[in-house]
Amino acid sequence: MPSGGEDQARAFYRDVLGFEEEAKPAALAGRGGVWFRAGAVRVHLGVDGDFRPATRAHPALRVEGLPGFIVRCTKAGHPVERAVPVPGVERAHVRDPFGNRIELVEVSDTARG
């Protein structure tokens, strides 16, 4: 993320996607950025002076209730693009405030086995 984007990151990752902010270790706190967690998932956003968004490479976050995530993202000003379907999986892409691509994935009950 670019320098100074911590509040934008919180508004998206915490307020829209539902992550909790996680305190950075004291040794890293002065570098800027922000860390988040949800269950076993951790997302660490570091500051990059020469920031360029990841527009192709991306994390895929497994969610429950994909339609609700789509509504929350859209209402918060983050357009969502439906992805090419994969059998048993609903997928969508959203961009964080910095242009990084995030895939939201919901696995159907039949695909879970």
Image (spheres, grey):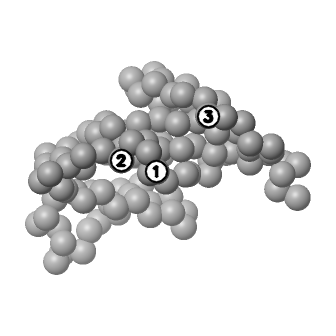
Instruction: Identify residue type, mark 2.
Output: Ala
Q: Say what secondary structure mark 2 lies in.
A: loop
| Residue 76 position (above or below residue 91) | above
Towards the viewer: 77 or 93 = 93
Q: Say what secondary structure mark 3 lies in.
A: loop
Which residue lies at the image location 49% right of the left edge and 53% below the top edge? 59
Residue 2 placement (x, y as % from top left): 18, 47
Question: Which label's residue is closer to the chain start, 3 or 1?
Answer: 1
| Marking on residue 54 | 2
Which residue lies at the image location 13% right of the left edge and 64% below the top edge? 31
Separation (CA) of disc 3 from disc 1: 13 Å
| Mark 3, other Cα within 10 Å: few <14 / some 14–19 / many ≥20 | few
Q: Say what secondary structure mark 1 lies in.
A: loop
Residue furthest toward the front? 56
Residue 64 placement (x, y as % from top left): 67, 45
Residue 36 placement (x, y as % from top left): 38, 58
Towards the viewer: 100 or 37 = 100
Viewed as shown, does residue 19 lie left or right of 50? right
| Mark 1, other Cα within 10 Å: few <14 / some 14–19 / many ≥20 | few
| Marking on residue 58 | 1
From the image, tell me which residue sits under label 3. Answer: 83
Quadrant of the rendered image containing residue 88: top right
| Residue 96 position (above or below residue 82) | below
Quadrant in the picture for the C terminus: bottom right
| Mark 2, other Cα within 10 Å: few <14 / some 14–19 / many ≥20 | some
